[in-house]
Image (cartoon, helix red, strand yellow):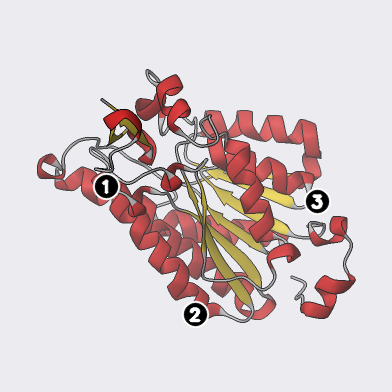
Amino acid sequence: MRKFNSDDIAASTLPELFDLSGHVALVTGASRGIGLASAALLAEAGARVVLVARDEGRLALAAEKLTAIAGADRVHKYSCNAGSADQVDDTIGRVMADLGRIDILVNNAATNPYYGPMSGLDMPRAEKTAQVNMLGPILWIQQAWSAWMREHGGVVINVASIGPFIVEQGAGMYAATKAALIHLTRQFAAELGPGVRVNAVAPGLVKTELSRTLWEDREDSIASALPLGRLGAARDIAASVLFLSSAASAWMTGHTMVIDGGALATPPIGVIGPGGAAVSRAPGGVRQWTR
């Protein structure tokens, strides 16, 4: 992967800053939502994209969509459980055999099999959440580092959440694993630099299947409480993934970008607002006035 310094940035045109031609970008959880949108945008920027997902049917449909945009030679798919050490090892080996490099790794795969109070969380679902959301990214980074990035450099983007910055009823375990991922982002950034940059994005409430239970029946009320007046779209997050993958962020590592429509900028719980309204929390970290 090209390594950029301040002189490169000063001399680069805007298209050059975001040009990913010649790069290979591997995206986990890429069959839908933020993963698919990120892969599509990276492909638009010139990268060859590797789609990784567990569901073979959805993966095939996603690859078909991207092939229509980018061409068959720039879209590759591999079925894999993102939290399985054996499958991650096998997939990285196949990608290296087929494409010869991994310049960009987007750890997007996530799961949330339990929604409810922490006091009722059973260990099988707790372990599954931790395995996919926290341990999975460690496996992917380790394998990408050993296979390519140690010698050639690269970029890692972890998809976290604004969950670690708030307390939200029902999503405690999911938020805990994402808090760990944010710390792992800093840890890996310190350990893998200067050749590899590691950053994260923390989405607010985005309209995806994973978050459907949070927004499906109350989209309008949640959106109206946000400073930007709408829920997020997958491409909103994909745009930040593209930025972090590109030379435009060449002097940035160990950081987490919050992309939340202003959810964390809303008043804190307990503040009394106009007309004596108090602040309560809606799903997705959105704080809203209630009477």
Label 3: element kind: loop
Q: Amino acid at mark 3?
A: Gly
| x, y percent for residue 289 | 33, 31
| x, y percent for residue 78 | 58, 45
Q: Is residue 86 visible?
A: yes
Q: Is residue 151 above or below residue 261?
A: below
Q: Quadrant of residue 212?
A: top left
Quote the CA–CA distance across marks 1 and 2: 28 Å
| x, y percent for residue 127 | 24, 51
Q: Is residue 31 visible?
A: no
Pair 1/2: label in front: 1
Q: Amino acid at mark 1?
A: Val
In the rendered structure, the answer to whether residue 281 lies left or right of residue 38 reads left
Q: Which residue is mark 1?
A: 167
Q: Which residue is mark 3?
A: 46
Decide which of 113, 214 is in the foreground and name it: 214
| x, y percent for residue 186 | 46, 71
Task: Choose the circle earlier in sequence order: 1 or 2.
Answer: 1
Q: Quadrant of the N terminus?
A: bottom right
Q: Residue placed at 52% from the left, 66% from the top?
A: 255
Q: Quadrant of the C terminus?
A: top left
Decide which of 239, 145 is in the foreground and name it: 239
Task: Choose the circle earlier in sequence order: 2 or 3.
Answer: 3
Q: Amino acid at mark 2?
A: Ala
In the rendered structure, the answer to whether residue 5 lies left or right of residue 128 reads right
Pair 2/3: label in front: 2
Q: Which label number is shown at residue 190?
A: 2
Q: Residue placed at 70% from the left, 70% from the top?
A: 250
Label 1: element kind: loop
Q: Residue placed at 75% from the left, 60% from the top?
A: 23
Q: Is residue 99 above or below residue 189?
A: above
